[in-house]
Image (cartoon, coloured by chain):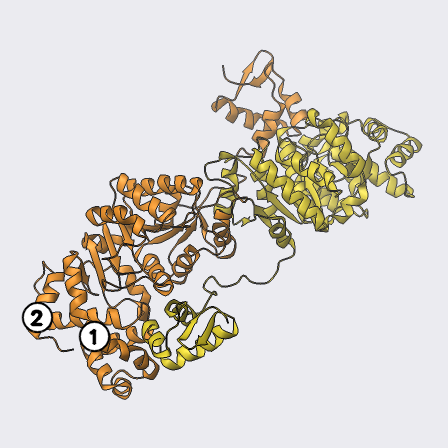
Chain colours: A orange, B yellow
Amino acid sequence: MTVPESEIAALVRAVVPDRPLDREQIADRYARARWSAIAEPGDADAGRLLAAVGAMAALELLSAGAPALADAAGGSFTEAVERWSPRLRQVDTPLHLRQAARFGARLLVPGDAEWPTGLDDLGMHAPSALWVRGDATLLGRLERSIAIVGARAATGYGEHVTVEVASGLVDRGFAIVSGAAFGIDGAAHRAALASGGSTVAFLAGGVDRFYPSAHETLLTRIVDRGAVVSEVPCGTAPTKWRFLQRNRLIAAASSATVVVEAGWRSGSLNTAGHAAQLGRPLGAVPGPVTSSASAGCHRLIREYDAVCVTTAQEMAELVDPTGAPTLLTGDPSPERTRVLDALTRTGRDLSRIAAISGMSLDAVRAELGMLELDGLATEGPSGWRRGSG
Amino acid sequence: MTVPESEIAALVRAVVPDRPLDREQIADRYARARWSAIAEPGDADAGRLLAAVGAMAALELLSAGAPALADAAGGSFTEAVERWSPRLRQVDTPLHLRQAARFGARLLVPGDAEWPTGLDDLGMHAPSALWVRGDATLLGRLERSIAIVGARAATGYGEHVTVEVASGLVDRGFAIVSGAAFGIDGAAHRAALASGGSTVAFLAGGVDRFYPSAHETLLTRIVDRGAVVSEVPCGTAPTKWRFLQRNRLIAAASSATVVVEAGWRSGSLNTAGHAAQLGRPLGAVPGPVTSSASAGCHRLIREYDAVCVTTAQEMAELVDPTGAPTLLTGDPSPERTRVLDALTRTGRDLSRIAAISGMSLDAVRAELGMLELDGLATEGPSGWRRGSG
């Protein structure tokens, strides 16, 4: 399928409306748009090839076959060419671009100011391009963002906690990233919007077809006040594989991932696994051990070293760690406890307090002095007693 | 206060009824009984002194004063002598022994078969003796025991979980150790008794005065079918200090400690702190983040590396660890997921499946073969389809 260069330029400019692009940039974007349909999300061969020769040359070499690719990019691409070739012929990139333009979607490529820097950590598994509806500039500011994900079959408890922590994180200046699914995801986006915060939804299918369709209204609101993103072009259906790969984008784009509720084999554990693999801080919200909707969270804490997080503040600390915890035994000193044990409200003399507390006179005297300063002991006619004045 | 040797022998034999004791053993036990009243629980100076010269010599040296102790045991005991001297004169050990005998209590000393081996890990902080009512032999078998402790102000959730896990642990052959307090402690003892298991209660005061008094019936049942233990003699009141030190005995005597519910500053965190200091496995049961009764448990998991435990089995694994956890991403392979995505219930030919899944023909063929073996795919006249037969 040969498309005239002028038409390509018009198609690409329609999805990159506010930026001057030279011929080469246009050709690169067009090629990346093609690759976003030729290779399945997360295809490491495609990532390796594009990194080695660029998107345009990669397309040309693909047309020339596996040996050409092996010569140019080093390594075997025989299997990959078998995967990619049927799609190379079928993929209708002009259609994808027209559909994107119709929906006001923008095409982002690595190097754009809006490109989420976190995606670079995906290496060869990074997407070749992103399709974005809404405020694409949000994507360039995800260093301060937290992914809140969880079970579709959330409980009232899970949704309540999600709303609380999402608003609390918005108040602390975090964007909320999620996957627009039923349950926890939806509650997270809604709470972010309700608190006037930024929120970004990553979809497994094209941004022209909202999934789940019952979240049409929610996703429309996210487009209006946040951003909806996908690495597959318009018209692409979500599949199980694409959901799993979408999860890697959620984990990579945000600065930490928190799972609020998850069954024992929930898909959110996959997002958590990606976050852990990428070295991103991972938190899980505990819940009743009698609730199967919290079993996956407990599993993450137990087996995968997820941090147990119970408040927005603790989630924020995943990204901005604070000082070391205080000591468990750091409460009153042994001397203080023992002298207080020996004091009454009526009064006892020093030697009696020493005998009762099993401490020396000097130690009791020193401790009583400190207790007096703290208003916890007073000396009177009947000796030392509890309380002040 | 001088007591004839014959009277001492009768007094000591009354609390060690079934074992022949020679003169020296009697004198040692008597001296340890005295020390259990002279030094407050956890007094490291007393531990150091008794380890250096033995309980009898330590008493004689104490009468002779600090310089004598320093000569004999090395190091300064000036402060300690000031603490101990008033008590040396006051402590009425014959009274303690008579009261113990009246309540059928037994006096244990280190080296007895019934002495809990875990207490040895307390080093200089180990008790000089233990006073036990009930089945003292249980104490010698605490290598397979779990301490279940928690908030006095437990919730219905906390008590429910306690009953479940305590019975589950009894079924797995564990003794249940706790502190006989209201709330979680009481529920743990009760569940152990109800399941026909062994249970041991450590008290902060003497074993002749049950605390809390509302647990009189429960503690009486524990004496009948388990054991009630204290390191302070009969007649001794529980104080804040003695509660804290009692907690160290619970942590040291059992092979793991589990906190079921605990407020942010609960006393159970002190038991947990002792367990952690002793290198004992420490577990905490999560709960709703909206429940303040679980805040201390979450704190233990978050800040003190307590293991998140949700079932009796997971608590048992604190003591008997099992194999490594499975991989989060260890579910279906990428190939399997993508081929399954491409299959329908009606059937598609191989090349179509390859195009849809974005995989090579060979890879699809191999995966279909494995799916067929698993009954997940079948070949028919219309190509490959989901399901078997």
Does residue A8 sit above or below B251 in this rendering? below
Of tags 2 and 1, the one toward the viewer is 2
Mark 2–mark 1 distance (CA, rounded to whole Å): 19 Å
Residue A55 - label: 1
- Along the line of sight, the residue nearer the viewer: B28 or A44: A44
Point out residue B158 in the picture as x, y percentages from the top left corner.
57, 37
Q: Is residue A264 left or right of residue A181?
A: right
Q: Position of residue A5 (x, y in %)?
A: 8, 74
Front residue of this view, candidates B4 and A241: A241
Which kind of residue does numbered mark 1 sit on?
Answer: Ala
* Res A47 seen here: yes
For marks 2 and 1 on the same chain, the one whose residue lies earlier in the sequence: 2
Residue A326, placed above or below residue A29: above
**Figure check: B101 above or below B303:** above
SS type, badge 1: helix
Q: Residue furthest top?
A: A381
Q: Nearer the viewer, residue A57 or B185?
A: A57
Q: Secondary structure at mark 2?
A: helix
Residue B177 in percent (x, y) is at 69, 42
Q: Which mark is residue A7?
A: 2
Identified at 57% across, 17% down, the residue is A385
**Are there few (<14), some (14-19), or many (20+) residues within 10 Å of tag 2?**
few
Q: Dot 1 falls on which chain?
A: A
Inspect the image, locate mark 2, and give the three-letter code of the amino acid beneath it: Glu
